[in-house]
Every structure is written in structure tokens, then in C-alpha cells.
Image (cartoon, helix red, strand yellow):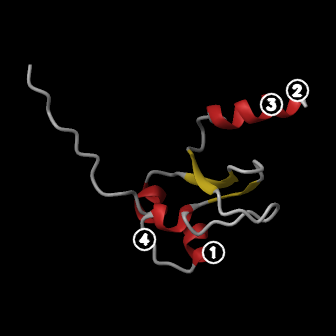
Amino acid sequence: MTRVPYDPGPPPDFNSAARNGFEFTAICQNCWHTGPRLTPAQWAERFGVPMTTPVIHCQRRLKCGRCGERAGYLHIEIPGYGKSRMVLDREKDQEGE
């Protein structure tokens, strides 16, 4: 059986995220501080980049407002689909503290 190679295509940019209705929340992997939930256009404006910029390039620039670490990432959220699994797991961890 021959495998067909998987081509993931180019990295998503803010335009494609906006077309698909995605929103992003910045989350620190060090202290789990979460930022605001913003649209791709709001993130592009905040970073001062054009909408054609790949999301991953801006993700590398995130800095946590609480602990100051550069260990953040933009978590993709799709409105209308409820909370993501990662967010639900984090709330469960906080209840146990």
C-alpha cells in the first residue's frame, strides 16, 4: 500500500484565520496566565503587522504580563464550539488547588 504524502500547506496567516471565524487567546506556558480573546484583526493591529503575516511569527513575540516569560502561544478558539479541551483541563486544575 502506497502512502500519499501529507502536505500541510503554508502556515496560517491572520487573513485565513479571520475568514474561518477563529479567535485567539494568548496563554503563558510558564504560569498559565491568559490574555484577552481577540479576533485576528485585533491581534494583527496589536502586533503592528499586516494581515498576511503568518500567526506563528507573532506567537514568538508574546511576553507574559504576569511573569515576564516569553513562553506564550496563541490558542485558537472557534466561536460557537464551546470551550476547548485545554481550557477545560486548566479550570479543573485550578479547582483542585
Task: Give the farthest residue toward the right.
Answer: 97
Helix, strand or loop at label 4? It is loop
- Provide the secondary structure element on which disc 1 rests: helix
Return the residue at label 3.
93
Identify the image quadrant of residue 80: top right
Q: Are marks 3 and 2 in contact (CB under 8 Å)?
A: yes
Which residue was labeled with disc 4? 53
- Label 2 neighbourhood size at 10 Å, few (<14), some (14-19), many (20+)? few
Query: Residue placed at 42% from the left, 71% from the top?
Result: 53
Q: Which residue is mark 2?
A: 96
Q: Which residue is mark 1?
A: 46
The amino acid sitting under disc 2 is Gly
Q: CA distance from mark 2 to mark 4?
A: 39 Å
Q: Amino acid at mark 4?
A: Thr
Residue 43 against residue 25 in the figure, above or below: below
Lateral position of residue 76 relative to residue 64, left or right: left
Dot placed on the residue nearer the N-terminal end, 2 or 1: 1
The type of residue carrying mark 3 is: Asp
Q: Secondary structure at mark 2?
A: helix
45 in relation to 20, above or below: below
Amino acid type, residue under disc 1 in the picture: Arg
**Closer to the eye: label 3 or 1:** 3
